[in-house]
Image (cartoon, rainbow, N blue to C red):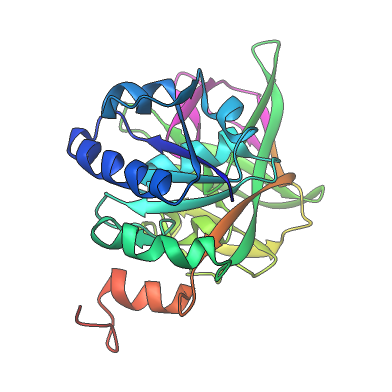
Amino acid sequence: MKRVGLLANPEKIASRQLIRRVARAIEKEGRAVLADSGTSRLADLSVTTFPDVTSLAREVDLLLVFGGDGTMLSAARSVAGLPTPILGVNIGSLGFLTEIASASVTEQLPAIWQGDFTIEERPLLEASGNIAQDDLFQLALNDFVISRGATSRLIELEVQVNGHALTNYRADGLIISSPTGSTAYSLAAGGAIVSPDAAVLTLTPICPHTLSNRSVIVSNDSELCVKVQSQKVEIFLTADGQVQVPVFFGNEICVRKSDKSVRLVRLPNSSFFQTLRQKLGWRGSNVN
């Protein structure tokens, strides 16, 4: 890994000194530091700079992402399908996707240079459809959510799985999540925690009117199609809680596993279940 890219959330001003320190540590090892324009301005770096994340990722052997899960999700959609591995440095609060705490990043880098790590392939989801006569195509690593806007009214969504009717949900909305996204909005709405290597998709209604409506898990080879049945209610499709598209009565959105994936760097002794114990405060979690 001779060329290392740096990517940061420009709103996290407190990360400026950390980014500079990491850049110096990388250069001290004789490796080139590159960055996107926003990170370069944030940390005042004198390095080769690229206008966006995608062009940066194409030119580096490793992308270090400084931020929380939101920054990682944004980066994942930009890097989707590229072979560039991503290593998350946690500057947020929860950090299910980030791998290294900000306080220990420089101490952990030698393991990376020595190749002492593994790569996890995480597939993305894709949503397609026709919205107001325009073709829709969006990617998400965590989830797609179809939900009402500011009006406090239930919406009705007709759901099919592989062309077979599942049910009509009357709810505040519906979450379709990947295993990666099972610990995000889906968990808060009562969905199951799913191991990231499980080949499934999860449908979780948000505050359903019918109490028998529960989270449903299907194979990740499934195509999930959702048709909007509500009128006069503002409704949105949201990708990873970051990209929002209005949808309307009669619109149908189909969600499936994408052919594109992201490659996450995992260090020795790191595991999904250890992260669960630590982040959710379960018994058996490490004190430090």
Count of number-bearing discs? 0
Residue 147 versus residue 286 in the image, above or below: above
Q: Nearer the viewer, residue 123 or 271?
A: 271
Name the quadrant containing residue 13: top left
Query: Is 251 inside the magenta-drawn segment?
Result: yes
**In the image shown, does 64 or 153 lie closer to the viewer?**
64
Residue 250 forms part of the magenta stretch: yes
Residue sitting at 47 percent across and 68 percent down? 111
Q: Position of residue 260 (x, y in %)?
A: 72, 44
Q: Nearer the viewer, residue 57 or 61?
A: 61
Residue drawn where x is 30% and y is 41% of the image: 19
Q: Is residue 21 left or right of residue 266?
A: left
Decide if residue 144 is in sight here.
Answer: yes
Q: Is residue 29 above or below residue 196?
A: above
Q: Height in image: 224 above or below 13?
A: below
Say which of 36 and 137 sits in front: 36
Q: Quadrant of the C terminus?
A: bottom left
Query: Which residues lie in the magenta part?
Result: 226-253
**Image coordinates for residue 205, horizontal then vertical, percent:** 48, 52
Q: Is residue 95 above or below residue 281?
A: above
Q: Name the spot of residue 65 as percent of width and height, x first.
A: 42, 44
Query: Residue at the top extreme?
Result: 133
Q: Picture coordinates of residue 54 (x, y %)?
A: 59, 29
Instruction: Report which quarter residue 70 is drawn in.
Output: top left
Q: Residue furthest bottom?
A: 284
Would you say residue 145 is visible in this rendering? Answer: no
Q: Is residue 257 left or right of residue 122?
A: right
